Amino acid sequence: VANPKKYFDEVYEIDLSTLEPHLVGPHTPDLARPVSKIAEEAKANNWPTKLSSALIGSCTNSSYEDIGRSAMLAEQAMDIGLKMQQPFLVSPGSTQIQNTITRDGQMKTFESVGATVLANACGPCIGQWARHMDDPTRKNSIITSFNRNFAKRNDGNASTHAFVASPEIVTALAI
C-alpha cells in the first residue's frame, strides 16, 4: 500500500461522486462553472439557451475513447427515438481514428443520429466549417469539445457564444 504522506507535504482527497460536469465560456477558456449554474447565468446575461450547433472532437483533442463515449450516448438517444436538435458535427481528429470508428460502428451511429462527420483536418476550432445561419448577426450559442472558444474563433461571428465541455456533455446537450 502506498503511503502518500511519506512522499508529499500535502495530500488532497477528492470524492469523485461529488464532482459535477462543467461548462466553460463563453469567449474565454477561464470561465468554468457547474452545468447546474449555466441556466441562471444564461438568463442573467441574455445568452441564447437553444444551441445552434454542437461539435465534438478536433485535430488536437479527439480520441477513440471520447468518440466512443459520445457514440454510446447517441445510441441511447436513438433507442428512445431521439435525434439531434441542431447540427451535430464530429471531427475524428486523424485518419486512424476515422478508420477505427468506421470499423467499430460509431460512424454509422453518428450518421443515424443525424451527425455530420467532418474531414480529418483543422476545422471548426479555427472557423473552417460550412456554418449555415439564416442571420449571422443573430446571437447564438454553440457547444464544443474543442479547446478554443474565444469570440469569433469558431465561426468568425462575434454574436456566437461558444461553450466548451466534455464530448459526453456536448452530446447530451445536443440531444
Image (cartoon, rainbow, N blue to C red):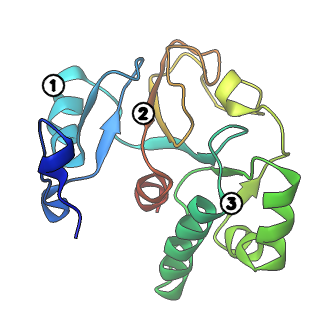
Foreground pick, 64 / 155: 64
Crowding at mark 2 (Cα within 10 Å: few <14, some 14-19, many 20+)? many
Q: Earlier in the sequence, mark 1 or mark 3?
A: 1
What residue lies at 54% left-to-right and 76% top-to-bottom?
72
Q: Which residue is mark 1?
A: 44
Foreground pick, 105 / 60: 60
Foreground pick, 108 / 40: 108
Extreme residue toward the front, this view: 6
Q: Which residue is mark 2?
A: 163
For label 1, the SS is helix
The answer to whether residue 131 shows anywhere in this view is: no
Which quarter of the figure is the N terminus placed in?
bottom left
Q: Amino acid at mark 1?
A: Ala
Q: Is residue 39 above or below residue 126?
A: below
- In three-dimensional space, the C-alpha distance between marks 1 and 3, rounded to whole angstroms, equals 31 Å
- In three-dimensional space, the C-alpha distance between marks 3 and 2, rounded to whole angstroms, equals 19 Å
Please give left or right for residue 118 compared with residue 57 in the image.
Answer: right
The spot of residue 109 in percent (x, y) is 68, 75
For label 3, the SS is strand
- In three-dimensional space, the C-alpha distance between marks 2 and 1, rounded to whole angstroms, equals 16 Å
Extreme residue toward the bottom, this view: 79
Crowding at mark 1 (Cα within 10 Å: few <14, some 14-19, many 20+)? few
The spot of residue 126 in percent (x, y) is 69, 22
The spot of residue 14 in percent (x, y) is 15, 54
What residue lies at 64% left-to-right and 23% top-to-bottom?
155
Q: Is residue 87 above or below residue 152?
A: below
Q: Which residue is mark 3?
A: 115
